[in-house]
Amino acid sequence: MMKEEYLYDSYRCPNCNQIRKLTELTYLLKWNEQFKSSYMISVVEEARQGHLKWACDDCIKSKRVVVGKAEEQNWNGITYPFFTHNDEILECQTCKCSFEFSKEEKKFWYEDLKFIVWSYPKNCASCRRKIREPKVKSKRLTELITNIENTDTTEVEEIIDIFLEYGNFEKAKYYLSVLRKRNAVDQERISFIKEKIHNLSQQNT
């Protein structure tokens, strides 16, 4: 006797929005056999009711989506995993511009980084870099200062530049004195950095 879920012979693909016959849903039927959950009736029934992220064979074979791996996703047993990933347009909370959350990025986001499946990036890549940059520079500054005895002259100049970006001119002057003591930088370069510190400090007053 045919199982109840197979009594429905057509499904609407959530990706292309086309009505598909079960014969066009071999991936969905495969997931139905492979994936079991105590709170899920079945994969095909949840798909029929519109609860799942999935796609028809045509969308998968034409690479409009990428196939996901439910077993590698963090869905915490209280929601549904993503059987496929599709491109999605989101709005950046910082700059308010639209940006694409691509299917490839989704697969990396949910399966490699293990972000929980109901989470989404709040900002576009550009804004995320700007938000992350101060943290990266702070970490880099800590690394350079901690190993100050082993830094070369270009790294000491990097310390000075970071302090100038922070507006900490006293620290910039201090590391200029460290640079001067190295005796590995010519006087012309020292004078250039000194003038840069002076000019930036004057602009800040």
Image (cartoon, rainbow, N blue to C red):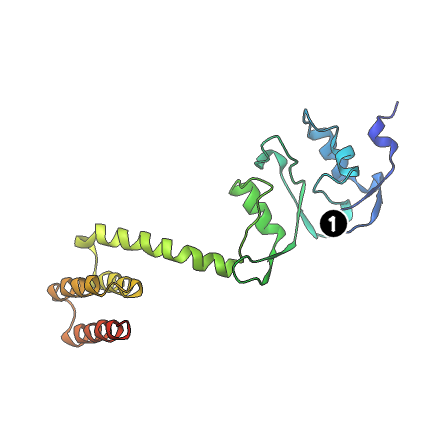
Residue under the image location 73 percent in, 29 percent down: 33
Position of residue 165 in the picture relative to residue 37 (left or right): left
Residue under the image location 16 percent in, 69 percent down: 185
Q: Single out the residue that lies furthest toward the front.
A: 205
Q: Which is nearer the eye, 128 or 148?
A: 128
Residue under the image location 77 percent in, 51 percent down: 16
Residue receiving disc 1: 15
Q: Quadrant of residue 101?
A: bottom right
Rendering coords of residue 129 (x, y %): 45, 58
> Is 113 situated above or below 145?
above
Total labels: the figure holds: 1
Position of residue 71 in the picture relative to residue 55 (left or right): left
Kind of residue sitting beneath label 1:
Asn
Rendering coords of residue 49 (x, y %): 78, 37
Q: Single out the residue that lies furthest toward the top.
A: 1
Rendering coords of residue 117 (x, y %): 59, 41
Position of residue 132 in the picture relative to residue 12 (left or right): left
Q: Quadrant of residue 38?
A: top right
Q: Determine whether the residue tagged by mark 1 lies in a helix, strand or loop.
A: loop
Which of the image's four quarters has the C terminus? bottom left
Which of the image's four quarters has the N terminus? top right
Rendering coords of residue 109 (x, y %): 55, 46
> Is 33 situated above or below 22?
above
Q: Residues within 10 Å of mark 1 (few under 14, many from 20)?
A: some
Residue under the image location 23 percent in, 71 percent down: 197
